[in-house]
Amino acid sequence: MKYKISNFKVSPKDDKNLYSLIQNKYHLHDFKYKILQRSIDARNKDKVFLLYKLMVETKEKVSGIDVSIYKDESIKMEYPIWKYSDRPIIVGFGPSGMLAALYLARCKAKPIILERGSKIEERKKRVKEFLENKKLFPNSNVQFGEGGAGTFSDGKLTTNLKDPLIQFILNEFYIHGAKEDILYDAKPHIGTDYLEIIVKNIRLEIESLGGEFYFDTKFDKVIEEKNNVIVYAKGDKEYTFKTRHILLGIGHSAKDTIRYLYNELGLSMEQKSFSMGVRIEHKREKIDYAQYGKFAKYLPAAYYKLASHNSSGRGVYTFCMCPGGFVLASQSDLGTIVVNGMSNNDRLGENSNSALLVDVKPSDYDKGNVLDGIDYQEKYEKLAFELSKDYRAPANLVKEFLENEVAHSLRSINTTYPHGLFFTDLNKCLPDFVIDNIKFGIQEFDKKLHGFNDPDAILIGIESRSSSPVRIIRDLNRKSSNPYIYPMGEGAGYAGGITSAALDGLKTAMKIINGESL
């Protein structure tokens, strides 16, 4: 018999003895167990505990207030055979492109994948070259290349979406190389070191099923014919492909492609809110203690997620928090500064960092063109670069920032940003309302997480690529205003992270295959 046990509380000190704890509480002799869910309850810093949901299989009777019969609710995926004469073209091999391509490959569609960046092995070399020697490759960098921007991140898989397909996606990541804990942790993450393995393994499976990859090959244009379109792409030579299905997973930084789709192809788009701000770096041990108190030494690096609204209703929030991580130079354009965060699976770095972002609304940047938000992003990314002109990032310390002064040097915290910092007034590279709300947020967040306003914490600018400023409009069939183009993922404005982008790509592919409302 299989039982589900909920609300199984374990002290962090005893977590390695889970089998014995189950055995002793339920007086069992012979059983197997599986972790279904694990979270940390740290609301009371004097009594932090791990909260488990378990499946226990045994011939013995298990009873109690938190015990019920286990029912397997996992999705059984079906893969209908591709019924169209053309091969689908997938533009971009980030999370949406990966899951769309994987599903279509299993449906024997033999998808063709166009990726402007390099495959992961070469991409890693090019990212390293930029981080160490400031040599930027505009089409293969932290933003572009196999795996998308999420490959160089913490690999967080949390999402506010409630969809049974999410468990399928997590399981695919596990099958292709992630650690098993992503299947049950309440806040799962992969880590950049494991993401590199996963994206390669997914590519290899797609290739084994007849999928075809064109790396370092940029989607160029579309020419419409009577019953199909011709896709032009440029790599080591010019390629053309005839198709009726273009799945567009270009990512939020493919600004040149967005401009082409709007200005020349005439796709319908709309402005949307996005965010701008900075990265904030703290000592990891201080964040760990603030979250877990005396139990910090028994638990993984601490995560936080904070949000607040000022009196005008504008939001300020933390995003893509990287426990034990690093601040990364993440630009894809020469002469700009863009920062982001990443961490490896073990999250054992000296610092923890997070984006500290403020809502930017269309009313802040609208000058009458749908693409004004992209211009707005670029303006401030270029201003940030102009302050140092050599990829040092504009920065300040929290104490001086709150007092409208500029720090002269680092104090108790060393930065992880690879190109060094340039201490300056951050008003020179961010809008006034962003600066004002970051100040508000720092002080508000300290009320929820004591030590957030550490005077030595480092503010590093600018973070501006958390989401796209535009949304490509699509209908219930997931088609754009061009009936052959299916926008998906973050670049199209329909996702905000690895899992939600992967889900959007998967559901787009399923929609095309099944022709049903998803």
Image: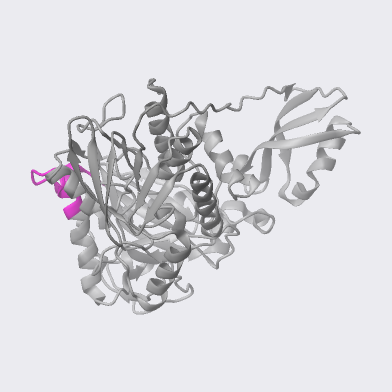
Tell whether position 368 is magenta.
yes
Q: Is residue 484 above or below residue 138?
A: above
Residue 165 appears left or right of 425: right
In the picture as drawn, the residue positioned furthest to the left comes out as 368
Residue shown at 61%/40% (left/top)?
183
Q: From the viewer's side, name the closer residue of 514 and 425.
A: 514
Residue 213 appears left or right of 376: right
Tally of numbered tags:
0
Tell whether position 369 is magenta.
yes
In the picture as drawn, the residue positioned furthest to the front comes out as 85
Quadrant housing residue 502: top left
Quadrant housing residue 516: top left
Q: Position of residue 138 (x, y in %)?
A: 29, 64
Q: From the viewer's side, name the closer residue of 151 and 207.
A: 207
Q: Is residue 385 above or below residue 290?
A: below
Residue shown at 39%/54% (left/top)?
149
Residue 383 appears left or right of 487: left
Residue shown at 75%/51% (left/top)?
13
Q: How is the image coloured?
A: one colour
Residue shown at 19%/44% (left/top)?
261
Q: Position of residue 112 (x, y in %)?
A: 38, 44
Q: Position of residue 313 (x, y in %)?
A: 27, 40
Specify whether residue 429 is in view. no
Q: From the viewer's side, name the closer residue of 518 and 186.
A: 518
Q: Position of residue 152 (x, y in %)?
A: 45, 58
Q: From the viewer's side, name the closer residue of 76 and 233.
A: 233
Specify whether residue 180 is in view. yes
Q: Which quadrant of the figure contains the C terminus?
A: top left
Q: Which residues are magenta?
A: 359-375
Q: Which quadrant of the figure contains the N terminus?
A: top right
